[in-house]
Amino acid sequence: MKTCLIVIDAQESFRQRPYWNEGVAAPYFAAQNALIAGAAEAGLPIVRIYHVDGPSTAANPFAVESGFVRPIEGVAGFEAAATFTKHRHSALVNSGLDIWLTQQGIGRLIVSGIRTEQCCETTTRHASDLGWEVDYVTNATLTFDMVQPDGTPLSAADIKARTATVLAGRFATICGVAQALERAA
């Protein structure tokens, strides 16, 4: 089955957010870079997704005008087979990605990027519902601590565990880097 690596929202915009934490990001960078290197070595197409939304001003880090909608430092450079811009959580909504994947004969997606429980999870669910097989590489996704509606802290580790739990067996195969690359071979 033809496989494609999707790198979602790995862009400098996130460094401009108050929750950004280099220490939390370091293991993600290592896993994302290993996944990119392995995909490139295997000849898999790698697709880059950017998220653009909000007011089109330099003050908004998710606006093109800010200059932050570009690859995030720390993620290895790669030649993208295609690049898409999205304006919703799912990379498959009005971006053209679904059309490109179909034209390329892609049957399996390897999902990675930023944020675990938002754009990565949403894209995974959407892709599964549209018929793609999805390998979700949890350690090649990044998120940050959050606060629940009742004020209780929720750690990034707990968010990642919850995401893996709700996706596993329903929407995706939960993989590590090596397993995702093995499945693509």
Image: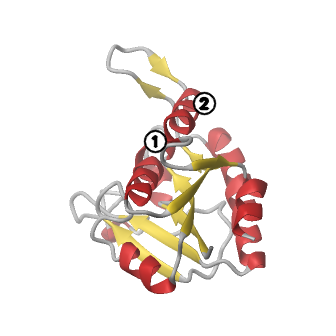
Residue at image point 53% right, 71% down: 107
**Residue at image mark 1:** 117
Q: Badge 2: few (under 14), some or many (20 or more) residues near its Cα, within 10 Å?
A: some
Q: Badge 1: few (under 14), some or many (20 or more) residues near its Cα, within 10 Å?
A: many
Q: Is residue 123 above or below residue 36?
A: above
Hey, which quadrant is residue 85 in on the image? bottom left
Q: Is residue 148 above or below residue 163?
A: above
Q: Secondary structure at mark 2?
A: helix
Q: Position of residue 37 (x, y in %)?
A: 75, 70
Q: Position of residue 171 (x, y in %)?
A: 48, 48
**Could one spot residue 3 in this view of the protein?**
yes
Q: Is residue 9 left or right of residue 175?
A: left
Q: Earlier in the sequence, mark 2 or mark 1?
A: 1
Q: CA distance from mark 2 to mark 1?
A: 11 Å
Q: Secondary structure at mark 1?
A: helix
Q: Identify which residue, 6 or 65, lies in the foreground.
A: 6
Q: Position of residue 175 (x, y in %)?
A: 68, 49
Q: Colour scheme in the image?
A: secondary structure
Quadrant that contains the N terminus: bottom right
Mark number, residue 157:
2
Residue at image point 69% right, 68% down: 76
**Could one spot residue 69 in this view of the protein?**
no
Residue at image point 23% right, 65% down: 56
Q: Is residue 73 left or right of residue 84?
A: right
